[in-house]
Image (cartoon, rainbow, N blue to C red):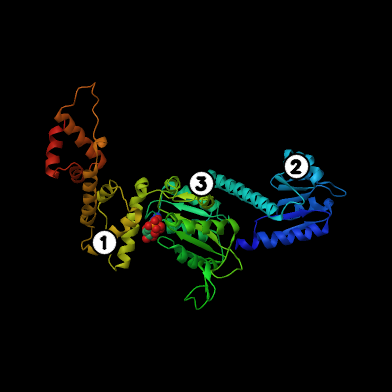
Amino acid sequence: MHTSCYPQRGILLVDDEEAFLRSMSVALERQAGFSHLYRCQDSRQAMSMLATHPIGIVLLDLTMPYLSGEELLSQISAQHPDISVIIISGLNQLETAMDCIRSGAFDYYVKTTEERRLIDGIKRAVQMQQMQAENQALRQRVLSDTLEQPEVFAQVITQNKAMRAIFQYLESISTSLQPVLISGESGVGKEQIAQAIHTLSRSHGPLISVNVAGLDDNVFSDTLFGHRRGAFTGADTARSGMIEQATGGTLFLDEIGDLSPASQVKLLRLIQEGEYYPLGSDRPKRLRARIIAATHQDLEAKLASNDFRNDLYYRLKVHHVEVPPLRQRLDDLPLLLDYFLAEAAKELSKSTPTAPKELYALLSHYHWPGNIRELKALVYDAVSRHKARVLSMDVFRQVIHSESKTLDTSANASDRVYFPSEKPLPTVQEINQLLIDEAMTRAQGNQSLAARLIGLSQPALNKRLKKSAP
Ligand SMILES: Nc1ncnc2c1ncn2[C@@H]1O[C@H](COP(=O)(O)OP(=O)(O)OP(=O)(O)O)[C@@H](O)[C@H]1O
């Protein structure tokens, strides 16, 4: 997968000193895991190398025979504006280095700078390029309103615009190595989205899921990092952690909002350093999997109450998807209902029942706290009980009615209808009429549903409707 070609476009090192080229290549490979590095000792050949190799970043020495770093920079900026150039200068050349920044260089470092800082700088440039590429891809997809791989989303039943925009976004970040945070209420389909991200990445490794809710810090470390034999009492054999099992693939951390403070620090270090230590081992291992985290919790609120680390939050949400709740995509209801009816009937070896028209109207007035999981469970329950050709609405009525009652009793004074004091109050008759009109609109003309919405029997509503008819 991507670990074998990170970053996506290569890095060209241009320096006349053979020793520097060699030591820098080794450092970039070993310490940062960068692959496809190119070296150029003769600055006159740099432009032809750029023309023939897929290069995204150039590390450029300032003092070189034939063509100076400054001259080369101006040629690169003119012919390859998408390449980021990082200047390596001598201590006595800071003035020139600053000029280079003004002429478009991404950054500069003094040659004696610690390698670690230089590597961090290159990583920043890589990250910036990835984001630019994703932005561009996303813009193109949104403008053309197309999906490149619609089959990846076949299991996510939807016709909703916001969901389609999410699919386009996911396609545009499919090759990124950065973490993805998926948020959204319980049951909205976050795990399905994680699966789609994994499939899109075309990685050769597996998708490994870990639910981190309720794991104490020791279990968390052991589960993720694994241990060496004898690391603690009872560790009779070595065990590889989930990170290792996810090598070349995706590590999906579900319920990330419930992670303990100590485990948050460990996860942050893993993402920042790109390496970890199995318990009892002093030899680090490299993280070679993409991280996806999901939560149904409001992480911003958890930041405010200091229950979730700021730095971890921003590391996790380099890419972020907020899956909307079902109540905000009611246009999906008919599709989902039909899909689950067919699925349930097949699993229960029954013929697929027909949903009565009123059912859509009834369901669209419910607020779906358990989202799609709740709808699926209700449909399965209804299908398992049903006997006739047309599906009975009883199961749905019972749940929706009892939920509505709970809501009614919890309504407070601020939910009441407001009558402006400067205007005369309407009569009881006028209020009744308004209520009936509103119920009929919400029930899309269905009298029995409208009657239930305002606590009347259907014959009683029918009588009043006839009375008020012109
Ligand atoms: N758009 C959809 N089409 C078909 N099935 C869906 C859709 N969204 C969710 N489901 C189904 O609903 C159930 C819940 O989905 P999932 O487990 O992905 O939700 P979740 O957001 O991860 O929930 P939680 O926060 O509780 O972990 C699963 O059975 C899933 O297959």
Mark 2 residue crowding within 10 angstroms, few (<14) / some (14–19) / many (20+) = few
Q: Which element carries disc 1, helix, strand or loop?
A: helix
Q: Which one is nearer the viewer's eye here, 437 or 298?
A: 298
Give the percent coordinates (x, y) of residue 59. Answer: 74, 51
Q: Which element carries disc 2, helix, strand or loop?
A: helix
* Identity of the residue drawn at 73% across and 62% down: 26
Instruction: Give the number of the disc on residue 145.
Output: 3
**Hey, what amino acid is under mark 2?**
Ala
* Number of marks in the rendered image: 3
* Identity of the residue drawn at 45% across and 63% down: 210
Residue 97 figure quarter:
top right
Q: Which of pointers 2 and 3 lies earlier in the amino acid sequence?
A: 2
Mark 1 residue crowding within 10 angstroms, few (<14) / some (14–19) / many (20+) = some
- In the image, residue 22 sits, relative to residue 245, either above or below, namely above
Q: Which residue is mark 2?
A: 78
Q: Nearer the viewer, mark 2 or mark 3?
A: 2
Give the percent coordinates (x, y) of residue 4. Answer: 64, 63
- In the rendered image, which quarter contains the N terminus? bottom right
Q: Which element carries disc 3, helix, strand or loop?
A: loop
Q: Nearer the viewer, mark 1 or mark 3?
A: 1
Which residue is at the far top? Answer: 422
Give the percent coordinates (x, y) of residue 113. Answer: 73, 51
- In the rendered image, which quarter contains the C terminus? top left
Give the percent coordinates (x, y) of residue 442. Answer: 26, 41
* Identity of the residue drawn at 61% across and 49% down: 133
Q: Which residue is mark 1?
A: 381
Q: Quadrant of ligand 1?
A: bottom left
**Hey, what amino acid is under mark 3?**
Asp
Q: Which of pointers 2 and 1 lies earlier in the amino acid sequence?
A: 2
Q: Would you say 288 lies left or right of 420 here?
A: right
Residue 147 in view (yes/no)? no
